[in-house]
Image: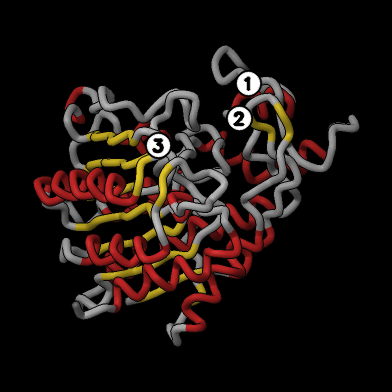
Amino acid sequence: MKIYSHEKQQLHHPKSYFSRGKMRQPQETPERLTELLKAPQIMGLEVTTAKEIGIEPILAVHDFDYVEFLKHGYEEWMASGEEMGEEVQTTVYMPNNNSGLGILAKAAKYQADGSAPIGKHSWTSIYWSAQTALNAADSLLNDQTHQSNIQICLTRPAGHHARKNAAGGFCYLNNAAIIAEHLRQKFQKIAILDTDMHHGQGIQEIFYDRKDVLYTSVHGNPVNFYPVVAGHEHERGYGEGSGYNINFPMPHGTDETGFFNYVDKSIEIVKLFNPDVIVHVLGFDVYKDDPQAKCHVSTQGFKTLATKVKALNKPVIILVEGGYCIEKLNENLQAFLSGLISKD
């Protein structure tokens, strides 16, 4: 088992979070990674500092102009000559029929909602989050010894809401999609198993017409719950991708047994697909006391989840994404890691 992270992921420190008609306290903070890193340290597990893989795998998934906005938007925002605050943040959402002339137009085009502001150091963290995930993919691509079968990436900001050309839901670059595409250099079939509290509409959108990448997601019912416009059962893919996008929206208030009933159904689909590699999008926001939770998974439940993923007996890259009950992230990750280590 290998664990990856990078200290520069902590530089992104959002100051604003506009959601459901009001400004809220940001939840995707640097302290999340601080707490996550405590788990392997306590358990005596090594964390490898990610090395730079480069921009090319990112551009294989995301539009060039969008990546340029993420990279240079803050500089253009500050150079505008207007008093617009210390983060790139928009209240105008116009992705179409928008020529992107001026930073306000670019923000309107490339920010899908009010939860993904861009500050002075945001791009650095966004970039190193993707590089951290890519280290795990590269390890599998170059592994001749089968010693990389389980890999964990402690990443922030997260990625599964990021679309091909839009940020949202605390996400900027879609790490799961980036590494799935990168892995296709060697592996024929990739399965993305998403158990975050929220549906990863960015992953769905990117692979919706493809059959080489299966996406299956267990998440809270998206009616009046983020991402609100995607994640329903009837969304099953398009063209060649028809049947390769499977959603399991849980009723709000689902208990732990119900959660695992949906997870087991999702896992059966992964088994049927028989992928070469599994990418597991792990969200600790399904934890019962998480401010985003609409279900009730216990700390012990994360150990159970890990054993189910491990039992698939496939190379797996685990992307640690959501989870905003900061005081429990360390404990919950320890439980998950113990399930991966367990010989039971």
Q: Nearer the viewer, mark 1 or mark 3?
A: 3
Please tell me which residue lies in front, 82 or 205. 205
Relative image position of residue 170 (x, y in whole percent): 57, 43
Label 3: state its secondary structure.
strand
Q: Nearer the viewer, mark 1 or mark 2?
A: 2
Relative image position of residue 256 (x, y in whole percent): 33, 51
Total number of numbered discs in the rendering: 3
Rendered residue at 65%/22% (across/down): 100
Hey, which quadrant is residue 218 in on the image?
A: top left
Q: Which residue is mark 3?
A: 220
Rendered residue at 30%/71% (across/down): 339
Left or right of 216: which side holds 270? Answer: left
Instruction: Give the spatial CA distance, label 1 vs label 2.
Output: 7 Å
Please tell me which residue lies in front, 223 or 47. 223
Relative image position of residue 217 (x, y in whole percent): 31, 41
Rendered residue at 48%/31% (across/down): 227
Seen in the picture, residue 237 relative to 35 is either above or below; the reply is above
Label 2: state its secondary structure.
loop
How was this image coloured?
secondary structure
Characterize the local packing of mark 3: few (<14), some (14-19) or many (20 or more) Cα atoms within 10 angstroms. many
Q: Nearer the viewer, mark 3 or mark 2?
A: 3
**Dividing the image into 4 quarters, which one contains the C terminus?**
bottom left
Q: Which residue is mark 2?
A: 113
Pointers 1 and 2 in contact (CB under 8 A)?
Answer: yes
Q: Which residue is mark 1?
A: 93
